[in-house]
Image: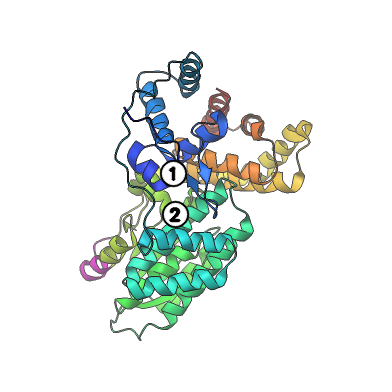
Amino acid sequence: MTPLSTTPAFNLKVVLKETGIRPDTLRAWERRYGLPKPQRSAGGHRLYSERDIETIKWLMARQEEGLSIARAVDLLRSQIAQGNDPLEHIEPPPLQPIATPGTLESIRQDWVEACLAFDEKRAEGLLNQAFALFPLETVVTEILQYAMIQVGEQWYQNDISVQQEHFASALVQRRLNALIAACPPPTRPEVILVGNPPSEQHLIPILMLNLFLRRRGFGVVDIGANVPVAKFDETVERIKPHLVVLSAQRLSTVAPMIEVILSLHPLKTQIAYGGRIFNLLPQLVDLIPAHYLGKSLDEAVRNIERLLSQRPPLPLPSAKLQTYQQTAEVFRHLRPQIEAKLFEELSPYNLPEEYLITAIEDFGDVLHSALAIGDLDAIHPELEWLRGLLHQHHLPDGILAPFLMAYAQAVRLMEVAQLTPLVEWLKTTAERVVA
């Protein structure tokens, strides 16, 4: 039997496809247990071997049998130490290695590596090559969009610097703006207003949608990122668009998006939305009183055309959502006091204040959104992001559990019955993080 290769030959996309593991779970295993142990390409990408992939599968199988991941890791290491490696008897599977030169995959990888090396000339040359070989929409979705997801994940994992992420984002935004400027004048009568709710800073998704809609002949008014609620109302009143499209990429901006939607409801305009967070947490879709555009740009464009032609009624806010909003409003009102208490609770740890402020503000935004949708468990996918944020800001790796416990104590001191479920969730999650 051929032994499993330890040569790093497979990227993250292959690993996720072959194993079915979640990216945040894989990152947690690598950080906490040192398994698997990917190597790095010249551009900083994780590269995995056949043995790495089979290690993941083996650990997942032990979890399905009822073992915790910590026990599964201990079992694997114990068997290897005893000379009974369970992976020795596994036949290597036929896997698809890294893409060959000239394909979308290879151009995307090369483009990311050029960006991480701050090589603007090479990055622009690769995009020019891609646009010469493939349709515009394919390049935008399969290279630019997917590459920025990769870059964002590496930044959240603290694998690349914020400067590298900003450099790549700036190149993408500049290219998208140039493509938008080159679009012909609208040929359809409908006007579509696109923008991001308060606190949502990600411009690239709405720039891509803007481009795709213009190429379909629509008139588009793009009011950008982090737009206050009142400005949405004001702009809608002024230009009377046929459709308003909102984008939210993280849980922390779901609550502000709902606020914008509820504010626009009395204006009797069509409202639609989309974004990464709704792909991660599809259960949110049923709560948002607007039209969901789907999981991809192509699907969003098709749904926009359907909405404009059929004009279905706008979903109404549910009574459940209104109750959640009341709880979220209580939290928002008390939040300055909670965060002041949190600083006191965390003072014994002597954490850098400037970094702690950012972590507290960002996590408060996440909690506000979770309360606004009535689902605190929706925060769990964000915890790995929070852990990464704490690490980026030079806070100790083990601070997450004390941070959550301190937050629970700060909320408890408010003595507000509506926030009791939040206190219990924070305490339970802190205990789970330690375990």
The image's colour scheme reads rainbow
Single out the residue that lies furthest toward the bottom: 185
Q: Residue 103's x, y, as percent?
A: 35, 62
> Residue at 74% across / 48% down in the picture?
354
Q: Estimate the spatial distance between the alpha carbons at disc 2 and disc 1, rounded to whole Å.
A: 9 Å
| Magenta segment main secondary structure | helix
For disc 1, the marked residue is 373
Q: Which residues are magenta?
A: 305-313
Q: Position of residue 344 (x, y in %)?
A: 75, 35
- Work out whether residue 258 can be spotted: yes
Quarter holding residue 320: top left
Q: Label 1, secondary structure: give it.
A: helix
Name which residue lies at 71% across and 47% down. Answer: 355
Q: Residues within 10 Å of mark 2 (few under 14, many from 20)?
A: many
Judge whether 224 appears above or below 391 on screen: below
Tag shown at residue 258: 2
Q: Is residue 16 left or right of residue 163?
A: left
Instruction: Judge whether residue 196 can be spotted in this image.
Output: no
- Residue type highlighted by circle 2: Ile
Q: Relative to residue 94, is residue 386 drawn left or right?
A: right
Q: Check residue 199 for magenta coloring.
A: no
Residue reaching furthest to the top: 82
Image quarter where the N terminus lies is top left
Q: Is residue 307 magenta?
A: yes
The amino acid type, in three-letter code, at marker 1 is Ile
Mark 2 and mark 1 residues within 8 Å of each other at the beta carbon: yes
Q: In the picture shown, does residue 278 fall above or below 204?
A: above
Q: Residue at x 54, y 55 (%)?
A: 43
- In front of the other: 221 or 233: 221
Which residue appears at 29% of the width and 84% of the height?
Answer: 187
Residue 218 percent location from the top left of the image: 32, 78
| Of the image marks 2 and 1, the number of the one nearer the N terminus | 2
